[in-house]
Amino acid sequence: MLYKEYGKTGKKISVIGFGGMRFLKDGETYDLDKCAALLQKASELGVNYFDTAPSYNQHMSEVIFGHAFKNMPKPFYVSTKSNASDGDKLRENLETSLKTMNVQKINFFHIWGVNTLDIYRQRIKKDGAYDTALRAKKEGLIEHLVFSTHCRGDEIAKIVRDGVFEGVTLGYNILNFPFRQEGLKAACEQGLGVAVMNPLSGGAIPKKAEYFDYIRNPDDATVTAAALRFLLSHKEITVALCGMATIEEVIADTEARENIKEFPESKKEEIKKNLSLSMDKLCTGCNYCEGCPSGVDVAKHMLAYNQDILVDRERYFGFMKFHWGLAPEAVEACTECGECEKKCTQHLNIIERFKEIAKWAKEQKK
Ligand code: SF4
Ligand code: SF4
């Protein structure tokens, strides 16, 4: 297993982290021993970053983590989160997480779901959630204060330049990298550690392996291997969080990372070109369409629409709700002026898609 420095924290983190949101149930419930064995096996293989959140797996993820922590083979770091908008609630969340996992401190505590600049401002306002977390840090209950986000790259750049966080967890993968590249670069320049979630675009990449075959280098066995290699060859990225539902997956992911080969620059260029050419139906998140006179955040809606193409409609709605807290019907503000379509690098029929989205939103309300 390879390890990288997480920002300026002095901690060396395994390049593959354990993402605790994909445990499988045995019938109606989770088998705690079986789920805990996944964390323990990952630890044995060198994974030392374990990421969870209070609501993952119907509030069972932290319970599973706590069960596993009774018997971890190697030292480890725990990461969890609070999406509380006020200080009291954050404190309550933190104390619950500490108790549930039976740990003395949270190594990486996330101000969770900072998905717009308004949310960011709200969380860091005086005596709010951030200040409470900072006090808990002084008490030794939190070691490093970080944030997680699905914002655009330019928004992330603004947040990290304020210098209030030690690290960030963001969604970044071979399909959406133009959307957050600016934020990733800024995070690195500011000396933040970076964890990436959704490294396989929520499973869309392995699911559509044939479609994405062009991302493979000749020496990548699978598109999954190529997608992870792409991420981990970024100097800006510390750790990629892999949802590990089976022990085989843990082993395969970890073994695959014994040696990270550089991802050739020429291949990155080829991928960018392919994103523009062969993936003619997909939005690349380049954000060239920004500046809608009616205030529609075109790129976010269009990136969510990708999920309908690649996975299913349900995932589209999930993306809208959890990543951006955007209502699908916000597209109704579109006056069909055509400005965004003129600027779209993929020549996408944005207006038609927005009509479709508006229809889905109506159907969902029925
Ligand atoms: S076509 Fe609609 S979404 Fe695009 S810029 Fe015009 S008003 Fe905005
Ligand atoms: S310009 Fe086109 S491809 Fe780029 S983000 Fe906007 S809709 Fe997506």
Image (cartoon, grey):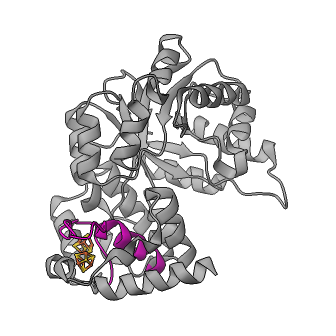
Residue at the spot 54% in from the left edge and 82% down from the top edge: 362
The image quarter in which residue 337 lies: bottom left
Disc count in the image?
A: 0
Q: Is residue 16 visible?
A: yes
**Left or right: 308 as drawn, with respect to 162:** right
Determine the residue located farthest toward the top in the rendered image: 139
User: Is residue 107 or residue 13 the one in the foreground?
Assistant: 107
Residue 303 x %, y % = 36, 70
The C terminus - image quarter:
bottom right
Q: Is residue 312 visible?
A: no
User: Residue 75 location, x and y as percent?
Assistant: 57, 24
**Residue 264 in magenta stretch:** no
Seen at 52% across and 78% down, the residue is 361
Instruction: Report ligand 2 position as a quadrant.
Output: bottom left
Viewer-nearest residue: 165 or 362 = 362
- What's drawn in magenta, residue-wise? 281-309
Q: Dividing the picture into quarters, in which one does residue 295 lie?
A: bottom left
Answer above or below: position of 57 versus 328: above
Q: List x then y, in percent, for residue 38.
A: 67, 45
Q: Residue shown at 54%/27% (left/top)?
A: 87
**Residue visible at 58% across and 84% down in the picture:** 363
Which quadrant does the N terminus fall into? top left
Q: Is residue 116 left or right of residue 204?
A: left
Name the residue at the right extreme: 28
Please tell me whether residue 298 belongs to the stretch shown in magenta.
yes
The front one of 269 and 341 is: 341
Q: Position of residue 314 (x, y in %)?
A: 57, 74
